Amino acid sequence: MSLSYRQPGVVLTDRRLTVPLDHDNPGGETIELYAREVVAGAKADADLPWLLYLQGGPGFGANRFVGQQAWLGRALEEYRVLLLDQRGTGASTPANRQTLPLRGGPREQADYLTHFRADAIVRDCEAIRPQITGGAPWTVLGQSFGGFCTVNYLAAAPEGLRAALITGGLPSLDAHADDVYRAAYPRIERKVAAHYARYPQDVERVRRIVEYLLRHEPVLNSGYRLTAEAFQSLGILLGGSEGSHRLHFLLENAFVRTAQGFTLSDAFQEEVHGLLSYAAHPLYALIHEAIYGQDARPTAWAAERVRGEFPHFDAAKALSGDGPVLFTGESVHPWTFDNDPALRPLRETADLLAARTDWAPLYDASRLAANEVPVAAAVYHDDMYVDTAHALRTARSIRGLRTWVTDEFEHDGVRAGGPRVLDRLVALSRDEV
């Protein structure tokens, strides 16, 4: 089923497609995928090659662009673009606290969610490609987790790819979740230090907020429990190009004087809830560590366990001295499910996923070493979300991959840099740079 309509400068077509829930059981249960086709209005009837966009996450639907925003304008110069909501996200059979109970209890929900990792997403892409392109290979642009999916694609189904473009998304081929977070905390600490160097007034502001949270443990107007650990996780902003500035502006109006004394302002609470709530993307929290599972070792709440190796991230200990309170970054913890009303019903499901020991390998190193697909990857010099050393080691493991290592952009470079980032990657994949 498809429906076409127009926005300024583009023609959009909504596509809904059916794929197996479990590709190893093609005659079994199916799920629906949603994808939006975009083509420049002046080229609507042209025979153009396809570019498939895989969003970062996991757990986020594809961007809802208006017209030719960000990198899309550059892509539409030569491609017909497919913006895919990966399974479980956006309009593609969403997985959340409202829909997952249809599967049954926590055990059934956890079993269901094992089918929502990169390998299943790539098999979805291959299942729908004949319907979209007529069987022709397409170019894939993978951002962040979308890059993880693209690396899986290169190993699992290279015949479906004309070229692969990756931005901030080269995963380690063999790191356990523990290794990922053991590398992450020092990166986060560097980002926090840079933020406090830029905005030294925020050191005292953060200490004051954390002191208040430890004393009161408030429940926000939304029902979200704002603990000190949850507040620290606002450091996730520091991995974006404007994140340090956004965090600073958030902190400057945290308190308001009332008849009962100082308390957290409604404006602060509203913005914090929007940043911390997983209501719009619960799959991110549910399978965030599962995307690193590849062997018989459980992920076992890796971010929480490894955090214990870095005691200077403990907010209460920081307050007992005169040093700064450190923010944390892109990680999910057991308390994440306790604090967030959108996740509380799914806590047992998350525990079961964290305990699984039957994760399949995601990346075939031997096939990547023999790769023949043109590949270009933007690697951000001190990416907070994807370890640069891990990314470069993977880059050296994929035959023919060309890297652009830059400190001009943060992890959101494909958004912030838009056409220039995509232009550079296309040129690299064609040996034009």
Image (cartoon, helix red, strand yellow):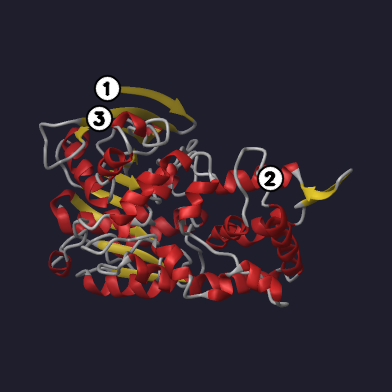
Give the Cα separation between the discs numbered 2 and 3.
Answer: 40 Å
Residue 107 seen in this snapshot: yes
Residue 82 seen in this snapshot: no
**Residue mark closest to the camera, 2 vs 3:** 2
Q: Is residue 138 above or below residue 433?
A: above
Q: Can you give x and y, in whole percent of width and height, for residue 7 in the image? A: 47, 29
- At x 32%, y 49%, the residue is 352
Q: Secondary structure at mark 3?
A: strand
Q: Amino acid at mark 3?
A: Leu
Q: Name the residue carrying label 1.
A: 1
Q: Name the residue carrying label 3.
A: 17
| Mark 3 surroundings: few (<14), some (14-19) or many (≥20) residues within 10 A | some
Answer with mark 2 or mark 3, whichever residue precedes in sequence. Answer: 3
Direction from residue 157 to residue 100 in the image, left or right: right
Q: Amino acid at mark 2?
A: Gln
In which quadrant of the rendered view does residue 106 lie?
top left
Q: Which mark is residue 269?
A: 2
Q: Secondary structure at mark 1?
A: loop
Q: Secondary structure at mark 2?
A: helix
| Mark 1 surroundings: few (<14), some (14-19) or many (≥20) residues within 10 A | few
In which quadrant of the rendered view does residue 38 lie?
top left
Q: Can you give x and y, in whole percent of width and height, for residue 303 in the image? A: 43, 64
Q: Can you give x and y, in whole percent of width and height, for residue 374 in the image? A: 22, 61
Answer with mark 1 or mark 3, whichever residue precedes in sequence. Answer: 1
Answer with mark 2 or mark 1, whichever residue precedes in sequence. Answer: 1
Direction from residue 291 to residue 345 in the image, left or right: right
- At x 20%, y 52%, the residue is 162
Q: Amino acid at mark 1?
A: Met
Give the Cα separation between the discs numbered 1 and 3.
Answer: 8 Å
Q: Quadrant of the C terminus?
A: bottom left
Give the Cα separation between the discs numbered 2 and 1.
Answer: 42 Å
